[in-house]
Image: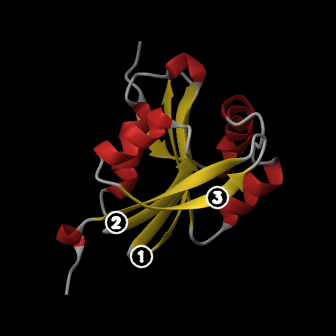
């Protein structure tokens, strides 16, 4: 068995990402058109972790230096509890002094991960998510060690 590889996603990965979206976010997956638009965007970023030719986890984000925003981070069910989300998020944050994200209030595992990486909850958007209706917790990570004057 080969070690999992973390790499930037390419347009060729879009069908795999669409399948993963349906598995990981069945109530509101990104469409093929949304994924393609994201990949075509000058600020859109996507990374994947794959092993043995299979997609294990992925991250969709934007970067407008010096800031980043995470839109999606997910691990496919078969590969959960292996640290892949932490690995993706850590790689994304490596050169960013400031990052934002939002997460469902009930997603305690994700919130623990974000907080363990230095994110701080900065607010709540009431009733932000649908199916079911739920608040979004807003998080920010500000790493002053990256700021260059």
Give residue 47's position: percent from left, percent from top. 51, 47
Q: Which quadrant holds residue 71? A: bottom right
Mark 2 → mark 3, Cα distance in angstroms: 28 Å
Residue 60 visible, this angle = no
Mark 1 → mark 3, Cα distance in angstroms: 29 Å
Q: Is residue 91 above or below residue 43?
A: above
Give residue 54's position: percent from left, percent from top. 58, 24
Residue positioned 75% across, 48% down in the render: 30
Quadrant where the N terminus sits is top left
Query: Mark 1 near mark 2, Cβ–Cβ under 8 Å?
Result: yes
How many marks overall? Answer: 3
Circle nearer the N terminus (2, 3): 2
How many neighbours does mark 3 have within 10 angstroms: few (below 14), some (14-19), or many (20 or more)?
few
Residue positioned 68% across, 60% down in the render: 38
Residue positioned 47% across, 35% down in the render: 108
Q: Is residue 82 above or below residue 15?
A: above
Q: Is residue 104 above or below residue 149?
A: above
How many neighbours does mark 2 have within 10 angstroms: few (below 14), some (14-19), or many (20 or more)?
many
**Which numbered mark, 2 or 3, is in the foreground of this view?**
3
Give residue 86's position: percent from left, percent from top. 37, 38
Mark 3 lies on a secondary structure that is strand
Residue positioned 80% across, 48% down in the render: 32
Circle nearer the N terminus (1, 2): 1
Residue 137 located left or right of residue 140? right
The image's colouring method is secondary structure
Mark 1 lies on a secondary structure that is loop
Q: Which of 146/40 is in front?
A: 146
Quadrant where the C terminus sits is bottom left
Q: Which residue is mark 2?
A: 96
Q: Which residue is mark 1?
A: 65
């Amino acid at each position: 068995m080969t070690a999992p590889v973390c790499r930037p996603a390419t347009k060729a990965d879009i069908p795999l990402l669409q399948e993963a979206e349906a598995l990981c976010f069945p109530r509101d997956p990104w469409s093929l058109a949304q994924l393609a638009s994201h990949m075509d965007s000058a600020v859109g970023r996507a990374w994947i972790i794959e092993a043995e030719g299979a997609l294990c986890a992925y991250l969709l984000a934007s970067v407008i230096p010096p800031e980043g925003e995470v839109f999606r981070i997910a691990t496919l069910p078969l590969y959960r509890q292996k640290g892949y989300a932490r690995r993706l998020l850590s790689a994304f944050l490596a050169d960013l002094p400031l990052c934002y994200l939002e997460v469902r209030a009930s997603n305690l595992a994700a919130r623990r991960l974000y907080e363990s990486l230095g994110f701080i909850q900065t607010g709540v958007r009431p009733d932000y998510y649908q199916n079911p209706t739920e608040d979004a917790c807003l998080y920010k990570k500000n790493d002053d060690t990256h700021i260059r004057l």
